[in-house]
Amino acid sequence: MSSDHQTKTIWYTRCPVPAASGVSIAKGWMADAFARHGVAVQSLRHSPERAIRNAHYTHGLDDAFRQGGNVPALHARSVGADTKLIGLSWAPQYAALVCKSESGIESPAGLEGRRLALPVRLNDTVDFWQSMSLRAYDVALRSAGLSRDDVDLVRLEIQQSYVDTNSSTNVDPHDHVPRLERQHLTELTALIRDEVDVIFAHSLWGVQMREQFNLHEILNINTLGDQDSRIGNEQPVTLTVSGGLLREHPDLVDIYVAETQQAAIWASRNPDEARRVLASEIGCAEYWLDEGTSPDISSQLTLSFDQILVDSLERRQEYLIANGFLASRVDFVDWIDTGPLKRAMARLKDR
């Protein structure tokens, strides 16, 4: 150890998105790697204490890792959280605008004058779902030469917090992330009741919802040719760590990154088994995986700092600032630390 501070527990959290750390955790490899060093690993998302679960957003715990959507990671850093960005990946996710089949909206051009559901989560530290919905609407409207002024954004207030989802049933400290089939519930209910005309559909749950309710797909964002249109909460996925842990125990950070990268390599070589793990991690049937993510998602989990990923994250930040989701700009030069990933890759070469 590199400090008098002895770390006995590593906290981790991951979003229900395709991510290599989730694979390592699900397979038990992460726990085994740290156990060899006398360190336990604990899921903050399964803590009975709400303040600890909320660190999924705030990154307010010492000795913690977070892999998942970029909105909470950027938000935490922008308000002063002591974190470092130590890896990026790109997780394709279904992102579409859908409506009732009988609505008469065939394409983005038909959005003019229509009511678009805008979910507003009142009790989350940062409303990542609203940011995704708004971004999808903006992309669709722009593709038809329209803007928000041409539609009616219907505010749907949601009381339940993401960090409270299924919290009473999360008894296994390494169990999969909470099932989120209900994530679209408020918008879907409004659509069925004819209170709105269009809703945002996301990930495997969005594909499943579209099929189960025979909804019409107005636009699948992922079919657009330019990458900028596909930038979202998981494009790119961020891996962050507590700054103090990296400064005091870089060896432990290196273990986490190496195990994450090793899991990505394993997934690329074992696609069938990896797909089953990913579907369980995301919380949906494997049947929806191809369209909900990508047919070759098992080969897209590797961490890197490719410039296209960094540039995409910077463009994502600009959108979030412009739309009021971030109060201040993150200095990427200060935030990014490529050391753990470089050392992890060197470690893996020696295995």
Image: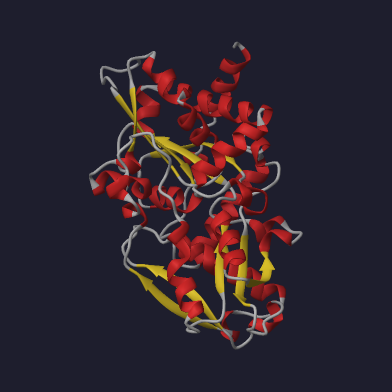
Q: Is residue 92 visible?
A: no
Residue farthest top in this picture: 350
Quarter where residue 46 is shown: top left
The residue sitting at 39% across, 37% down in the picture is: 175
Q: Please give the count of numbered marks on the rendered protein.
A: 0
Compared with 212, 37 (above or below) is above
Q: For this rendering, which residue is in front, 339 or 131?
A: 131
Residue farthest to the left, as pictured? 49
At a point 38% along the width and 26% down the height, the residue shown is 247
Of residues 21 and 277, which is closer to you in this image? 277
Q: How far across and how far down the image is residue 147, in percent?
A: 62, 79
Q: Is residue 213 left or right of residue 307?
A: left
Coordinates of residue 199 in the picture (x, y in percent): 54, 72
Left or right of 6? Residue 80 is right
Residue located 51% across and 66% down the image: 322
Q: Nearer the viewer, residue 33 or 62?
A: 33
Residue 133 versus residue 152 in the image, above or below: above
For the question of whether residue 117 can be seen, the reply is yes
Residue 253: x %, y % from top left: 43, 25
- Give the quarter of the figure containing the C terminus: top right
Kindly give the residue lying farthest to the right in the view shown: 225
In the image, residue 323 sits, relative to residue 7, either above or below, namely below
Q: How is the image coloured?
A: secondary structure
Q: Position of residue 105 (x, y in %)?
A: 67, 82
Identify which residue is drawn at 52% across, 29% down: 260
Q: Nearer the viewer, residue 168 or 74?
A: 168
Image quadrant in which the N terminus is located: top left
